[in-house]
Amino acid sequence: MKRNILITVLICSALAVLSCATGSSIDADTLPSAPGDAVLYQHKIVPGDTIYITVWEVDQPKEFTAQVKNNGTIDLMFMTDLKVIGLTEDQLNEYLVKEISTYYVNPRVSVSLSTFIYLLGEVRNPGVYDFEKGQTLISVLAVAGGPTRAAKLRNTLIIRGDYHDNPTVIVSDASRIFRKGDLSENVILQSGDIIYVPSTLISDVNYYITQIKPILDFFMLSTLLGL
């Protein structure tokens, strides 16, 4: 809750900056729709993810929690700066078995991830939310209390991938979900997705992403610090 309060304050102060990127409507046909194989998505680790690790020594489990730092590494036991960014859960498990095998004979390791999505703009409770596999745009909007009256749902944006380096941007006409029950607009989300519900119609998506980068950096830092 504390984290979301701080983020809400920051969002309010940033909206004036973001409004400079607004104007005429986005043409939905010019931006990619959700990938057809979204249900097969495997999350790749990003900074801010929390990793839960169990290592069995003989039959005694030892449990560890590690958060992925901004440089994409974690510290585990006496090992530091293990680079895990970009790995899937299965790849992470294999990687840690290899690393731990330097110190333990035939270690048994299991991992699980706690991941996040980011919800900005005209929703009742913007902030950072835990991600669960299979979540959709509409389910996250519902958790956040739904859109405000000022929301321009037609231009709802989902920013996916490294927002510093040529991210994929998906546009959803989420108004069709509410008005017509059109579930084709109900994007299946991936961990790390940034959802933005604007108050005005956006004309320049690239400029908007440029403006929002400092805000997203704050989100990542607040997640790492547990604010």
Image (spheres, rainbow, N blue to C red):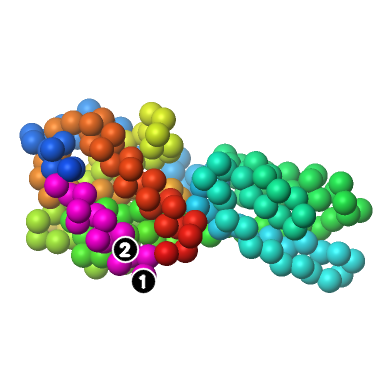
13 or 73: nearer the viewer: 13
The quadrant the C terminus occupies is: bottom left
Q: Position of residue 68 (x, y in %)?
A: 57, 51
For residue 86, side relative to residue 178 (left or right): right
Instruction: Give the mark toward the camera: 2 or 1.
Output: 2
* Residue 7 image-quadrant placement: bottom left
Crowding at mark 1 (Cα within 10 Å: few <14, some 14-19, many 20+): few
The stretch of residues the image draws in magenta is: 1-16
For residue 100, side relative to residue 88 (left or right): right
Picture residue at 31% right of the left edge, 63% below the top: 6
Residue type for callout 1: Met
Picture residue at 47% right of the left edge, 63% below the top: 226
Residue that mark 2 sits on: 6
Residue that mark 1 sits on: 1
Q: Position of residue 186 (x, y in %)?
A: 29, 51
Circle 2: element type: helix
Residue type for callout 2: Leu
Q: Position of residue 77 (x, y in %)?
A: 75, 58
Q: Tag 1 or tag 2, which sits nearer the N-term?
A: 1
Q: Which mark is residue 197?
A: none
